[in-house]
Amino acid sequence: MEQPSSFWLLLAVFAPVLAGLLSMRIRPSLVTPRVLVALVGPVVSFLSVLIHLAGHGVAKTDAATKVITWIPSLNLNVAFLADGLGAFFALLVSGIGILIVLYARPYFGMSKDEQYRFYPTLGFFTTAMMGIVLSDYMLLTLLFWEMTSISSFFLIGWYRYEKESVHKAMQAFFTTGLGGMAMLGGILMFGSSEGIWRWSEVAHWHPHSSGYVIAAFCMMFAGAATKSAQYPWHYWLPGAMVAPTPVSTFLHSATMVKAGVFLVGRMYPAFHELTIWPWLILIPGAITMLFGAVTALNQHDLKRIFAYTTVSQLGLLMCAYGLGGLEFEHGGQHLMAIDWDVTQIANHAFYKAPLFIIAGAIAHVAGTRDLPKLYGFWRVNKPMVIVMLLAGYALAGGPGTISFPAKELFFYAIYHAFEIHWIFQVLAVMAVLTAVCNVAIFVRLFTTLLGLPFGQRDLSFDVAVQGQGHGHGDGHDEHHDVGFWAAMLWVPGAVLVAWQYLGGLLPNLWSWIFRPLEANVNYEGFAERLPFVWEMHWGIPLIMSLCAIGGGLVVGLSPLMRGAVGDVHDRIYPFLYWLCVHGGGRAFRTFQSGHFRWYVVAVVSFLILGFAGSVYFEPAMLDVHTASPLEFWPGLLLGIVICVSALMLPMVEKRVIRVLVLGACGFSVVGMYLIYQAPDLALTQLMFELISVILFVLVLRMLPSPDVKKSPGKVWRIAISAAVGITMGWMTLLAANSGTPPALGPFFEANSYEGTEATGGRGGGGHNIVNVVLVDFRGFDTLGEITVLSIAALGVWALLPGRAVRRLEEKFGSEGGAA
Amino acid sequence: MTNHWIILFIIVPQVTGILSVLLMNKIRAQRFIGTLSFVFNTVFSIYLLLEVRAHGTIFVSQMSDWPAPFGISIVFDGLSGLLVAASSMVALGCYIHSFSLMHPMTQRRYFHPLIQLLMFGVNLSFLTGDLFNLFVSFEIMLMASYAMLTLGAERRQLTQAYKYILLNLIASTVFVIAAGLVYGLMGTLNMADLARIVAEKTAPGGEGLPAGFTAVSVMMLLVFGLKGAIFPLWFWLPDTYYTCPISIAAMFSGMLTKVGVYALARTFPLIFAHGAGHSMIMVIFAISAAFTMFLGVLGAVSNHEVRRILAIHVISQVGYMVFGIALMTPIALAGCLFYMIQHMVVKSALFLCCGIMERYAGTDDLYKMGGLLKRDRLLAVLFFVAAMSLVGLPPLSGFFGKLVIIQEGWHIHWWLSVLGLATGALTLLSMLKIWSYGFWNPPKGQHVVVPTGAPRPRMLKSGYFGVTLLVLTALFLGFGAQPVYDIAFQAGEQLTNPRAYISAVLQYDIDAPPHEQLAAAEHDAEVVDPMAVVADEREEATP
C-alpha cells in the first residue's frame, strides 16, 4: 500500500505557529487584522486535517504517512499517524483553537500588548498540541509534549510581574516536566529494548511482559499522569487557573490536559494486555475522579469549580482506559471492557470548554467569578446563563446530551468488570458518587444563577447592582465591545455545547460522524450507533444513573458542602521546592564546606584509596624484584640526607632556615645525579637550586614576618602524607623495575647526530642527546614550556600596578565596579 | 592521513598572542587580530570536520617530522575535531562579548594575549597525541587561566584563584609523576602506541599489563577528574567563576572542565581502563557520575546567585559526561562527546547572558532582581533558549546528548539513567528559578551600575552579538544533530576500537600487519619509517 504524503498534516501542525508569528509583524494598533491573521492558523490546520482525511480516510493504527528524514540515527524523524484517535484530537484542537482565537479578542479587549503576546503563544501551543496528537515517532511526540509544557508555562505565567502567576507557572512546568522526564525514560527504554520507535510499529509488535516493557510502560504512564493531573499530581491544574480564561479553556480543560489521556489511548494497543495495565491506571484514576468531584463541590470560584471537575473527569477518562485492560465474557465472546472511547473524550471537551468560556465571560461582565456573588446573574446577561446551564446540564450527564450515553457506557464497563473481581463494586460506588457531585454542581449553578431558592448567595453583594458596572476582576483592560465581538464572548461556548445536544438528540448523526474514528467498539447494543435515550437497557448501569441524579438533586439543594475549602495538595510543590533548595543545599555544602584543608585531604584520600583498590585488584604490584639498596652505600647516604631534610621542612619555623633546608634537600639530589653518572642533569639541577635559594632568601627578606599559627599536628595528617609518599616511592620503584624496554631512548641515541635508515638519514645534528631531545625530538614540548613561562611573566606583570596602569586608571576609573 | 596544516590550530593563537603583546596599546588592532584568529580556527576546524564526516579521515602531523612514537604527534580526528571547533566557537563568542562587557582597564592588562595563549593550551590538549605533551598543554592552560582569573587583581579574586591553582598544582604534580610511571612501565608516551601495547598485552594470550598499571590509571583518573571537576574532586570549581570578569568566567565554564573530561574520554577507553583494575575503574566512574550529577544539581538549585547556580551546574553536567564514559560503549561515548560540545556552547551562552543581566540589575543575586523581561526581550529569548537547551528539552541541543547517554544507560547502569532523568527535572527547576526571579516577578533592581567611562547598556551590542552567536550554534546543534552525530558516532567507535587511530598515528596498517613491520616498530635498532619505505619502492618502480 502506498503511504500517504505527509504534506497536509505537516501543514496542519505548523500552520498555527506560523500564523502566530506572522501576527507579530502586524502593527500593535491594528487589533482586528491581527485576530484575522491568527485565525488563519487553526483554520488552515482544521481544513488540512479534513483534506488529508478526505484523501486517505482515517488511517489504520499501522498506516503512517511518508517519513521525512531528520535525525535517523537517533530514531527521530517526521511522520504522522492520523488514525481515529489522532485525527479526532487534531480536529478537536484546531476546531477549539479557532473558537479561542475569536473568544480571546473580546476577552482581552483592545489591550494591545496582550493581544500582541497572546496570539503567537497560542499559535505555538496549538502547533505543539497538533504535533502530539499526529506524530508517529514516539520521540517526536515527546518533543511536542515538552513544547506544550513550555507554552503552558508562558500562558500560566501570563501576568508575569505578579508573584502568584509566576509561582503557579513554575509549579505547573516543574510537575509536568518531571513527568516528561519519566516519559522520555520510558520511550528510550521501550525503544532500545524492543527496537520500536513509532506508534505505528506497535501494531506489529507481539506484546510480552518483560521487565523492560513493564518499567517502560510505568514511566510513560507517569508522564501521562502528571500531564493529565492524576492524583496526587493534580495540584498544578487548579493552580494553573491564574491564567487568563481563554488559556484555561483551551489548555487546561479541552486539550493539553487531555494529552495524558491521549497518550494512554496511544499506548492502549501496545500495553493493554499487561497485567499491570488496569491496576496502574485505575487506582490513581479512581481516586482522582472522586477527589476532584468532591473538591469541586466545595469551591466558590467558578474557575476552581470547573478546574476540579476537569480533574475529576480526567480521572474518569483514565479509568475508562484502565478498564479497557480487562477482558470479560459476553455471549461466548471475549471482549475488552472499553467502548466508544473517543466519544467519551469528546463529551468532556464539548461541555467543559463552554463552561470555562462562560466563566470567563461572566467574570468579564460581572467582575467576579464567585458563585455566591453571582446569585441572580440571569437578570444581567441571559445568553451567557443559558449557555452555561446547557453545558452544566451536560456536566450532570442529563438525558438528551451525549454525556448521558457516555456515562452510561462507562457504567457498563464497570458493570462488566464486576465479573472479574468484586473490588470493582467499590469503583462503581466511586463512580456514582462522582456523578452525584456533578449533578449537585449543576443544581447549584442552576439555582444560583437563576436566583432561585436554595441557591448560594452572598448577601453583601448584588450582582445586578454592583456587577453591572463592568468589573474587571479578571485582569483585562477597560474596553468593552458591543455587537459582534461582544457576542463572541459566549457564542464559541454555544457552538461547542450544541454538539452535546446534537449527540444526545440525534445519536444517528453523532454515530455517523464518530463511528469511523472509534477504534474500540465492543458492546452489543452499541456496535453501530449510540442508542437513543429511550433505547437504554434496563439494568444496573441505568439504575446507577438514576441514583446519581436523585442523589445529586438532594445534595445540590441541601445546605451541605457549601463552603470554599482549600486543597492540602497545594503544599506538595512548595514542599518539594523546599526540599531541593534547603535539603539539597545542605547536602552540597557538607561536601563543599569552604575549608581548603578538607579539599586537599579529600583529593589526597582519593589517591590513597585508589592505590589501596589497585593493590586489591592487582596484588602483583607488591612484588618488586630489585637489588638491595644497601649495596650502594653512597646512594643510601644521600637518600638519608634527602629524607631527613624533607622531614625537617615542616618542623622548622623560620622561613629563611626553611629555604636553606630545602636547598640542602636539592643539593643532595644533585649529588644523587652525580653518583649515578648524569652530570648534565646534575648541572642543571645545581643551577636551579642555586638560583632558587638565592632568590628565595632575597625575596623573603623583604616580606613581612608571618604570624605563625601552630596548627594542631594531627596524627592522621602525618599518616596521609606518609601514605602518599610511600606509595609514590613504591610506584617509582615498580616503574624502574618493570623490565619494559624503553622504546624511545635507543632511537634518540641512534639518531641524535646522524640519522639511520629509520629516519631516512636525517639526524638531530647534536652530540648531546639531552639537548637534541629538548630542542628537536621533543622540541614541541619545549615550545610549550617556554610559553608557560612567558604566560607566567605576563600574568605577574598584569597583577602589578605599574605607572601605565595608574594612568589608565585615571582615565577609565578603577575596575571594582565593572566585574 | 598526514596533514601538517592542523598545526595552525596551535600556531595561529600563539602568534596572535605574541602580536597582541606587541600591540599592547592598540586595543582595536588587538581585537581585530584576536577575532580573526578565532574565526580562522572555527572555520578551519569545521572545514576539516566535513572531511572527517565524509571519509572518516584522521589527520595526523608529526612534529619535527620524527616518526611516531619518537616525536610528538598532533592528531585531528572526530573527537578532537569537534572539541576544537566548539571551543573555538565559544572563544569567539566570549571574546566578542568581552569587548563591551569587560572593563577597559582589565582589557589592557594583557587580556587579549592571555586569551590567545589559553586557546593555544586548550587546542593543544585536544589535539596532542602524546601523554607528556598533554601535561605541557595543561600547564599552559593552567598558567593562562590563573593569570586571567586574577585579571583585575581584587583581593577576593586572588583568594579564590589561590584555591584553584593549588588544587590544580596537586593534579599537575601527580600528572607528571604518573606520566613518568607510564613511560617506565610501558616504554612509550604516545597515546596510539600505548593503545597498541595495551591492546596487544591484554589480548588473549598476551602477557598482561605490567604490575602497577592500575595504580597509574588511578593517578590519571585523579588528574583528569580534578580538571574535569568530577566527584569527589570538584572543589576548585564552584568558587572560581564567582569573582572574575564574566566573559572570562563564561569561557572557563565552557572549556576548562571539558579538557579534563576530554582527557578521560580519550585515554581511558584507549589505555587506562584496561587490565586488572578495569572493573574498579568502571565502578569509580559510575559512582562518581551519580554523585557528580545529583549533588551538583542540588548545589545549583539551592543557590540564588546566578553565577553560582550556573557554575555549580557545570558539575552536574559533567556528571552526564562521566556517565557516558562510565558506560564506555561506542554509542555512549558518542553521546558523551555530543554532550560535551553542546554544553560548552550552552553554558558559555548562559554565562554571557548572566553578564548582561548583571549590567541591568546591578547584581547577580536573584532575590534582588526582577522584571528584566520588561527591560529587554531579546536577552530573555536568548536566555530561555540556552536555559532550555541546558535542561535538555527537545529539540534543543541538550536533549540529544542526554538522550543517547540515558538510552545506553538503561541496559548497563539503569540506576544512573534514573538519576540522570531526576537531575534533568531539577535542572529544569533551577533554570526556572533564574527565569522567574530574574525575568519575571515584580520589577526591581532596575538601576544600572555603570562606572564612569565603562560602556553604557545601549553600547552592549558586542555582548549581544556574542550571546546570539552561541545561542545560534546551540540551536544548530539541536536541529542539526544528525551531521554532528555522524562524526560523534565515528569518534565513539574509534575510541572503543582504536585500530584506525593507531594505524593513522603510527602510520602503518594495523589490520594487515607485515610482521616484520610490527617488529620493526618495536625494535628500535631496526626502526623503518614506513613512509620512507614506500618512497623507496616508488623510486624503484620508476626507473
Image (spheres, coloured by chain):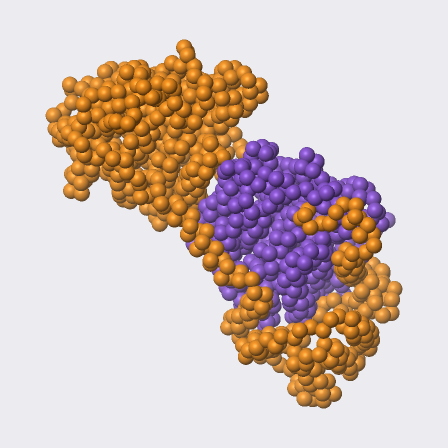
Quadrant position of residue A106: top left
Residue drawn at the location 59% of the way across and 75% of the way down: A711
Residue drawn at the location 46% of the way across and 51% of the way down: A581
Q: Which residue sits furthest front?
A: A460
Question: How many numbered dots are placed on residues in this image?
Answer: 0
Q: Which residue sits furthest left?
A: A538
- Relative to A653, say whether B104 is above or below: above
Query: Residue A469 in the image: x percent, y percent?
Result: 37, 19
- Relative to B65, say whether B349 is above or below: above
Is residue A377 or residue B171 the one in the foreground? A377
Query: Residue B129 in the image: x percent, y percent?
Result: 69, 56
Q: Is residue A518 visible?
A: no
Q: Colour of chain A?
A: orange
Residue drawn at the location 28% of the way across and 42% of the way down: A284
Is residue A719 or residue B108 the one in the foreground? B108
Query: Residue A80 in the image: x percent, y percent?
Result: 45, 28
Query: Residue A205 in the image: x percent, y percent?
Result: 37, 38
Is residue B93 or residue B7 the one in the foreground? B93
Q: Is residue B45 left or right of residue A590?
A: right
Chain in purple, by letter, is B
Q: Which residue sits furthest top?
A: A483
Q: Is residue A160 visible?
A: yes
Is residue B146 or residue A586 the one in the foreground? A586
Quadrant position of residue B74: bottom right
Q: Quadrant of the N terminus of chain A?
A: top left
